Image (cartoon, rainbow, N blue to C red):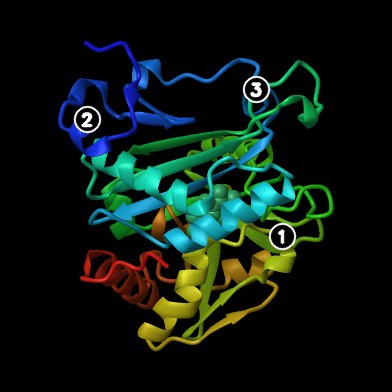
Amino acid sequence: MTTAPVATKPAPAAKHSLSDAERPYIWIDGKLLPKAQACVSVFDHGFLYGDGCFEGIRVYQGKIFKCGRHMDRIYRNADRLRMEMPWDRHECTRVMRECISANNLSDGYIRLIFSRGVGTLGLDPRKCPKPSMVVIADQITLYPAEMYEKGMKVVVAKRPKTPTECLDPTLKSLNYLNNILAKVEAIDAGCHEAIMLSLDGYVGECTGDNLFIVKNGEVLTSPLEVGMLDGITREFVMTQLCNAGGVKCVEKRLKIEDVYNADEVFLTGTAAEMIAVTQVGDRKIGSGSEGPITKKLRAEFRKVVTGAHVPED
Ligand code: PMP
């Protein structure tokens, strides 16, 4: 078993000698390491304070789905955090492709992390001279396969979303505590997801997914101003899948009553992809099973990601 870091260059020669047992190989600041050796410092401010940002990215047929959109989002967020990354978006994309290849991934998931990096104890980001970049390329199964056919139950979290004025949810930061505490509410209620409301009672998003409803043949979702992540799957549904499926999609501030009274509800996210919600708390949604529009959009989604042109834009 090799204990030395596996050099990232030249990748093609090295990749065939990588062993399955050590996978996934994880890229940290220029080195591709077997998972047992892939560690970050306890002085890393991502670890100490959640100071950093990240992306979850899907790989379909070896292609990086919506790579351009993910690069836009993470580099915009790094800028907002005033983190100057030593790797630009092209180098970052190259590293992700290297990880896909090193781990023999065809369909999988990439976790891309930008951390403030190693510093001193204390918050001061100026004491962290160099941000860190980590790329994990692996498999992911968020929900059991049958849940995609039957739909899922969610709850409404009692805890509201942190207001945008305090922490803008479009900043996909390494601090997910607001969402994790809502997720614990979901787990306590025996389900996988929780709907999070804004302080003034509008439907924002779930802990790791955006939310849509279907009413009278139209697809509706709250606008970003309510407070939610600008989901890349959300955008894909709104701008491409609804068009392809011939369904109208509009943004409207949704109240929880709109969700209860919807004909269909579904969630979108990179890891979750698209999944129907068939129960919210004690209330059955629509017929209680996946509705026809959700089914149609989900079929469109599969058509794109299994088709000849997986969009990398
Ligand atoms: N909201 C939250 C809080 C999330 O963590 C995610 C997953 N990234 C989403 C929505 C869905 O966003 P995307 O489609 O970009 O994965």
Disc 2 on helix, strand or loop? helix
- Identify which amino acid the numbered label 2 is placed on: Ala
Residue 68 x, y percent position in the rendering: 47, 62
Q: Earlier in the sequence, mark 1 or mark 2?
A: 2
- Identify which amino acid the numbered label 3 is placed on: Val
Q: Which residue is mark 3?
A: 118
Out of 227 and 115, give the one closest to the viewer: 115
Q: From the viewer's perspective, is 20 left or right of 263?
A: left
Circles 1 and 2, Cβ within 8 Å, touching? The answer is no
Q: Which residue is mark 1?
A: 227
User: Which of labels 1 and 2 is toward the front?
Assistant: 2
Circles 3 and 2, Cβ within 8 Å, touching? The answer is no
- Name the image quarter holding residue 240: bottom left
Circles 3 and 1, Cβ within 8 Å, touching? The answer is no
Residue shown at the point (60%, 62%) measured from the top left: 230
The answer to whether residue 161 is visible is no
- Identify which amino acid the numbered label 1 is placed on: Gly
Out of 191 and 267, give the one closest to the viewer: 267
Residue 146 x, y percent position in the rendering: 27, 51
Q: Earlier in the sequence, mark 3 or mark 1?
A: 3
Position of 263 relative to 153 (above/below): below
Residues at marks 3 and 2, CA–CA distance in whole angstroms: 29 Å
Position of 222 relative to 169 (above/below): below
Q: Which residue is mark 2?
A: 14
- Name the image quarter holding residue 136: top left
